[in-house]
Amino acid sequence: MGAKICVNSLWKAFPTPRGPLSVIEDVGFTLTEGEFVALVGPSGCGKTTLLHILAGFDRPDRGDVLVDDLPMRGPRRTGVFVFQRGAVFPWLTVQQNMTLVLRDLPPATRQELANEYLTLAGLQGFERSYPHQLSGGMLQRVELARALVTRPEILYLDEPLGALDALTRLQMRVEMRRLLARERCTTLMVTHDVEEALEMADRILVFSPRPATIQAVVPVPFPQPRTMTHPGLVALKEEILRELGLQS
Amino acid sequence: MDADLLPSKLNALVVIAVGITIWWLSIFLSGSHIFPTPWHVILGIVELGKQGLLLKHVAASLYRVTYGYLLAALLAIGLGLLMGRFRRVYVACNALVQMLRPISPIAWIPLSILWFGVGDLSPIFLIFLASFFPMVVGTVAGVMTIERRYLWAAENFGLGRLALFRYVILPGALPQIITGMRIGLGVAWLVVVAAEMVAINSGLGYLIIDSRNAGNRYDLVVAGMVLIGIIGLLLDSLMRSLERLDEVQWRYGR
């Protein structure tokens, strides 16, 4: 009861010239409303495919995904996906990107909401810029602002900071936490950055190499804001790295 | 930007000047009396201007190109968007498009005269045919290469079918549509001249054929060719200015 997202025994294989390649095997878990779950695993293990299935962009071979007890039939406005390489439309200005996704609202409300979220994300003064005129960090803010402005119930984040350099990444980690804390969406985040997961998530699912199976479930029972110097987090980090086979 | 470009623009002029010099020298060295010198060609253009024929021929050709080309652009971009977006439309239309595409518009001249007579309609039809296919191909490629994440995002945010075309598919394909339009206009200009060589009494193509037939006025023949070249250059720079639109800088800029 009370499950926002219920994932039942998902299986997925891709056809290849040498026969089917299994990428997801028997993955199941549930998320309660407002929970933040990070999916951590080696790159290429099938996390992104899993997230695509959870958001309705792809279909599993077996198993199903229930959102609010209803089977997932395709992407919906209530669950917004933030793509690894970004999907802010490069032919529209920042402002146009924001208002386009609010098309069902009256124009005045669109402007108001767009301005509110642009300000929130620290993007004042960039409304008329085109995405290619922005730095990677700024672009990521647009990405998040555009996702949040529709006030989704669920956020799917696929390596949201993956494209950034290390320094910008640290800055944006703080920024993202601030933005997400305000909205309290149910959040699924794929990452290969263990610290990122530890700082943000309520629970971490550690995945095995391909085919992806859940290898460990690590609750992170510490209040926000967290810093990586916290001894509890340090212990958890070691535990997760050990699960990933990166530390003995 | 302009300061950087200035030397290369000067170079372009130098190359043209070298070409004209070679032209002049070869006439001088061969002692040809029939082939016109650049100076004779300029005199020929001035003569056409004085008789009011320059404007008449240029306007006639441009008129035909404008109608044939705009009609083609409208239909080609429309069809290309549908073919690029809907697999069924693509499968249904692509074979025919690829069959008609390699047939030179010149091959259509007899049929075109049969159907449309010897008025303006015939060259307009030929220009339409010639410029239609590059624009269809460009538009289809443009739509098909829009990255999946943009289409997924549009679906995710629940954009309706019209909004999807207006704000995602059309602008996403626009850079390649513009490339197709540039090629299309080049071909249109190429074909108008050929079309006007047959049974028409105006246009730059007519000027060339008529000048030869009516007394071997090779100065006017070459004048017609030079005008075609200059106008072609101007038309292309007009199309290239489309590439400077803000909406396509994500592809062309950088």
Image: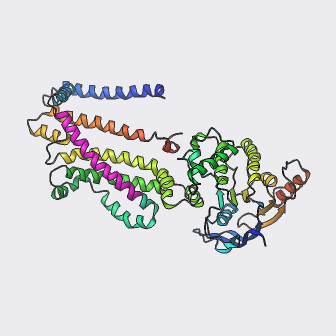
> Quick check: A122 above or below A23?
above
Q: Which residue is at the front of the view, A66 or A38?
A: A66
Tell me if A64 is positioned left or right of B51 in this view: right
The residue located at (36%, 64%) in the rendering is: B95
Which stretch appears magenta?
A: B52-80
Tell me if B197 is positioned left or right of B133 in this view: left
Q: Is residue B224 visible?
A: yes
Q: Which residue is at the front of the view, B215 or A52?
A: A52
x and y percentages locating residue B94 in the rendered image? 38, 63
- Residue extending farthest to the bottom is A62
The residue located at (35%, 60%) in the rendering is: B98
Name the image quarter holding the C terminus of chain A: bottom right
Q: Residue B63 colored magenta? A: yes
> Quick check: B161 above or below A107?
below
When asked about the image quadrant of residue B234, the answer is: top left
Q: Which residue is at the front of the view, B86 or B214?
A: B86
Name the image quarter holding the N terminus of chain A: bottom right
x and y percentages locating residue A87 in the rendered image? 60, 52
When asked about the image quadrant of residue B90, the answer is: bottom left
x and y percentages locating residue B42 in the rendered image? 21, 27
- Residue extending farthest to the left is B215
Tell me if A61 is positioned left or right of A167 in this view: left
- Disc count in the image? 0
